[in-house]
Amino acid sequence: MEPTFGRPNAVAVAKRAQHPHAALLFADFMLSLEGQNLIKERNRVPASPKVDTQLNKFPYEMIDPALILDEADKWEKLWSELFLRGQAVQRDRD
């Protein structure tokens, strides 16, 4: 089915990670070829084009992350109306 779209995901280290060096090593591993192959083995989509997947065999467009951020309030409101009976989405904040 065309067009096909993908949404970018990320890996990061939490601001107050108990073990920030271990978290950084984990993030580094997840972005390595070995980590990307592990993601593929778990039936997830690896980000690396070096990992052979069906997604490397057809054209697709990535959704602009800035657009996701710009429209976050709109989609959060819709989610709230559809699934939370209009209640606000609860988030843990600093």
Image (cartoon, helix red, strand yellow):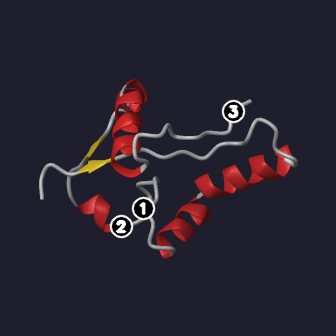
Instruction: Pick the residue in front: 87 or 7.
Output: 87
Which amino acid, by three-letter code, is at mark 2?
A: Thr
The reply to whether callout 2 and callout 1 are in contact (CB within 8 Å) is yes
Q: Residues within 10 Å of mark 1 (few under 14, many from 20)?
A: some
Of the numbered discs 2 and 1, the one sitting upstream in the chain is 1
Q: Identify the residue shown where x is 30% and y is 61%.
A: 55
Tag 1 secondary structure = loop
**Could you give the CA–CA distance between mark 1 and mark 3, rounded to whole angstroms?**
29 Å
- Mark 3 sits on what residue? 93
Q: Identify the residue shown where x is 35% and y is 42%.
A: 81
- Quarter occupied by the N terminus: bottom left
Marker disc for residue 45: 1
Marker disc for residue 53: 2
Marker disc for residue 94: none
**Could you give the CA–CA distance between mark 2 and mark 3, rounded to whole angstroms?**
37 Å
The x and y percentages for residue 54 are: 29, 67
Which amino acid, by three-letter code, is at mark 3?
A: Arg
**Could you give the CA–CA distance between mark 2 and mark 1, rounded to whole angstroms?**
8 Å
